Amino acid sequence: MADQTSVDQPGRGLTEIPDNVLSLTSVEMINLRHNKVKALPPHFGLCFQASLKRLWLWCNQFTEFPEVVLQLSNLEILDLRENFIRELPPNISALQKLQKLWLCENRLESLPDSICDMENLTDFMAHRNKLRTLPFGFGRLKLENLNLRENPLIQPPLEVCIKGMSAIAAYQREIEEAKVTVSVPPRLKIVVLGNLMAGKTSLVAALTRAVSRLAKEEARTHCMEVKEWTVSESELSHLTGTTDNTSLQEFVFDVYDVGGHDTYHTVLPFFVAAHALQLLIVDLSEYRTEDFESAVGYWIRTVNARAPGATVCVVGTKTDKLASQEQVDMAYNKLKRDIDQMLEAELSQLRQEIERLEKVLEEPFDDNSTTDDILSDAKRSSVRDRLVLLRRMVDQQPNIVLQNTVSSSDQLTGIAQLKKTILSLATNQELFPNVRSSIPKSWSLLLGLFESARANNGSVSDSGPRICLPFDQVREIGKSVCLSGENLNSALSYLHETGRILHYKDSPSLQKLVFHNPTALVQVLRAVQHHDVVQLFDPTHSGFDYLSNSGLQKARENLDKHGLVRTKELKVMLRDQVRTEAEVHAVLSLVEKFGLCHRLGTEEMSDSIDRPTEWYRFPRPSTRVDYNTWSEDVPEGVEELQIGCRVLGSFPTGLFQRLCSNAHKYLQYRWDRADRVLGSTGTRLVHLHHRGDKRTNHDHITMATRGNAEDASDLWTAVLQVQHELESLMTEYPAVASEFYVTCHQCLRIGAVEPHRFPGTLMKHPHAVEIGTVQCPVADHGQVNTALVLPPHECNVHVSGLDGTRQVVNNVTTINNTQNYDACQFGNNNQLIKNPSPENYE
């Protein structure tokens, strides 16, 4: 017993360290994660001073850092995630051999200066704390892995910190060398949301211009409009009642008015953010409790899915249409009650699910076999992952503010009070800590030069670039303010994260461009996401002179029915936003980067953009393509490998469409419908399907292929590359509860109504060759082939990202007869299905 080298007691409900553990003398690893320990005994450090190297105290109940740990001179890994620790000891550097320090999801408000002296530290995870500053020497650390997200950091700004150690080091070095920082003028983004005709555009006019502009139907917002609203120091003084002018500073708001049409919901997640104020507009004159989900619930869930804990200010509009103040109050109280009930119900549901999963973890392990060990461990790992997410969702409920009712008619009733509310929220350091921060003076000068470039090339008569600048030109601009190399990259990263510019360093097609006018890109989205195709292809516009009336009609049908448009027409649609061929390339690459479309055709884009074989598909709610679908019955002699993702509750708008666009780089042929895609990787068909389950209120996205079990590695490769794309997309929705799974292939064969789903965490554990079968617990077929449940060791999937090599061909109507396709890969008629090719119309 004294020679035992590890103690592994996770999830045992322990409240203190067992005496038999303290009697050990040569322990190198202690794992006590997921227990209820509040403190370590005083002699803990002395017991394990020389031997202990790894200490796992993840998810316990520590409210203070256990200082006895500082006596562990050989400690290399310390895991204190998900506790309640508020501060670290000043002498944390006593742990000189420590390599990995994990403190995420605690309550840390600061870090001691001595942490900068921990020369061997390589991993520091402190996301989801309350850190506002980093020690000035933090950039000296040689960290390989750093996570500081979801902290209210202002020094360095969070936008710098999330870019990693090189950005932090460059920032602190720039400050040290220049000794000059400047305050960033306070600026906040406001995103205006709500149903069609709720009064958004009229409200924006009342806020930004203090005028009534009752929008008629033809004046609806198309996709999005951006207005700048500047509140002067004198107006601030008047609205806030502040007499101390030294504390006042001009405040600028960028107001994004999002169109209410369904077509525009796909782009909404790109603008919603935790560091923005969301205004949710509700028409009080038409509000009914039965309309709550579409008018209010959907929007709040959409915001919180993308930006957990975001502030949503709900504004009731059109009060002038109600007969009396009593009716206004009744409608307002009804709306408030419905919101409170929704939040209470969702919180209760989360807590019930947490309680259920905690009971699952208390169930004993089934240790009958190696296979059962693997399945049991995978199930517990999946449950723990979900528990972490659900607990986080409880802590990050949306911050709903409901205290304003207005009319945007001539009297502008309630608008002044709404302005006061907005200013009160915007100046709240707890809600928006990064509104006021300091940056190196050179960064501020660089921003000023970009703003000058925007102003100078905005004229229609100017032939220069309007939306983006080549990086060579940006490099020269940087030199003029003494920024180069890593310092320039850090400045660009900061400006990108704060929305002043767009620069995608990880994208081969976009890294050589800087989009110095992001608001102009909204006009691009307005063009490509326009919901009215008749207006979009206006025959009176000279740009479409080359098309006959029948050609225009075919162009409309291609976009409306199939979501397809040629680059030639795209160039005309973007006529007001771009001037050069290079800008056309840049804009289309950027829209593709967003996952809003994918390109069809045999060749990459070149200087000749007008080739009639080049098409783009923009998935739209109205897209309807008929084809002979993937057979629901699995043919004899083959097996179906299916990976799925179950999304609980509200399904993120546009998620499936973005997956279909991102997956295009893996597909040589594809056939699209609103809820599914059938595509070929060249050797196998891959079937993507989105379906809702009304009984359980869950949505499922499944990714499947078919073949022989002997070809398991090939099957896994075909579906895992798409699964990785979906997994990456899901990280953009941190408050969406989802779980991956592998569907039992025998259940699929017999057409089980409720097929068994093995936990998706199995995919992280490639199976050993000797494990041949596993047990399906819900069907009579018993053992199933492990090769179709666990990915094999030799399966090696490389995900290249959106800008990787694309396997694309022309719209295919026939298939080369020399290609060998198994019958199981096809539809009901065992034939490749004809691709819905668009019509040429010149």
Image (cartoon, rainbow, N blue to C red):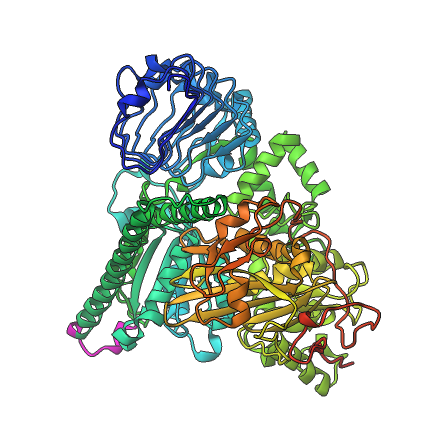
Please tell me how many numbered marks the rendered image carries.
0
Front in this rendered view, residue 432 or 395: 395
The residue sitting at 44% across, 70% down in the picture is 692
Q: At which x and y percent is residue 50?
A: 42, 12
Residue 320 on the magenta span: yes
Front in this rendered view, residue 263 or 704: 704
Image: 470 above or below 675: above
Residue 468 on the magenta span: no
Q: At which x and y percent is residue 332?
A: 22, 68
The residue sitting at 43% across, 59% down in the picture is 777
The residue lying furthest to the left in this view is 326
Answer with left or right where residue 806 lies relative to residue 195. Answer: right
Q: At which x and y percent is residue 39?
A: 26, 25
Image: 136 above or below 543: above
The residue sitting at 30% across, 61% down in the picture is 314
Q: Quadrant of the C terminus?
A: bottom right
Q: At which x and y percent is residue 153?
A: 41, 35
Image: 367 above or below 190: above
Image: 330 above or below 81: below
Picture quadrant where residue 318 is located:
bottom left
- Magenta-colored span: 318-326
Q: Is residue 438 visible?
A: yes
